[in-house]
Image: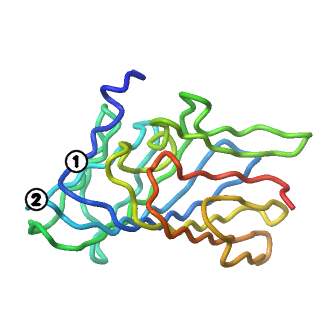
Amino acid sequence: GGSSANYSVASTNFDVHHIRLEWNVDPAILYINGKITFDFTVTQSTNSLTFDLLKQLTVDSIWYHGNKISFVQTPENGVVLNLPITINSGTKDSVSIFYQGVPGASGFGTFYQGAHAGTPVIWTLSEPYGSREWWPCKNGLNDKADSIDIIVTCPQQYQPSSNGIIVNNTVSGAFRRTEFRHRFPIASYLIALAVTNYV
């Protein structure tokens, strides 16, 4: 459903500080492949964390302290991480989620793949609660990340645009890798991606 009542099932037992978002996309194909790394502080003792992610997207693996951990994707568009230990309140920690699939497109389009003037294009518009349709996140508005780094890999003839400033833009063989750095608090829905033949 699209009602705001169920826009997020993410747990409130952790506070996100930094997100590293690594994406592989081709603007000619409606698909995303990514690795999202969260740095966070646990706010209440727990052995489980829940993120938001559209159930049609596939979580391939989740890494914690160099090891794969078990997880469950729920019908309510959640990903429940089963930690191998209980983390005490106040502990800083991190986790990486590898995932892929065909994004959803509710709201204002959320994740669009098509063409502009004959050239393939991908763009996102996640306001208000569309982020979970294309990346694992905390989909609410009350836990902003303090900072983010975004790394986009795409076919070399295209140029990604995203949040913050470009700190690296390198072509290697058939692919371009562009790194963005953003150092201000940001809500999940404001994290955005666009890829086409930008100059």
Query: Which residue is tagged 1?
Result: 11
The vertical placement of 63 against 2, above or below, is below
Image quadrant in which the C terminus is located = bottom right
Q: Nearer the viewer, residue 98 or 9?
A: 9
**What amino acid is labelled 1 in the image?**
Ser
Residue lying at 74% horizontally and 49% vertically, measured from the top left = 27
Q: CA distance from mark 2 to mark 1?
A: 11 Å
The vertical placement of 40 against 194, above or below, is below
- Label 2's element? loop
Image quadrant in which the N terminus is located = top left
Q: Looking at the image, is mark 2 or mark 1 earlier in the sequence?
A: 1
Q: Residue 48 location in percent, x, y?
A: 17, 55
Q: Residue 67 location in percent, x, y?
A: 28, 73
Count neighbours of disc 2 (C-alpha within 10 A) and say few if under 14, some if 14 to 19, many if 20 or more: some
Q: Residue 81 location in percent, x, y?
A: 24, 55
Query: Which residue is tagged 2?
Result: 44
The vertical placement of 93 against 129, above or below, is below
| Residue 106 image-quadrant placement | top right
Count of picture labels: 2
Q: Residue 105 location in percent, x, y?
A: 57, 31
**What amino acid is labelled 2 in the image?**
Gln
**Left or right, 28 with reference to 38:** right
As drawn, the residue found furthest toward the right would be 117
| Residue 61 image-quadrant placement | bottom left
Task: Find residue 32 and name its label.
Answer: none
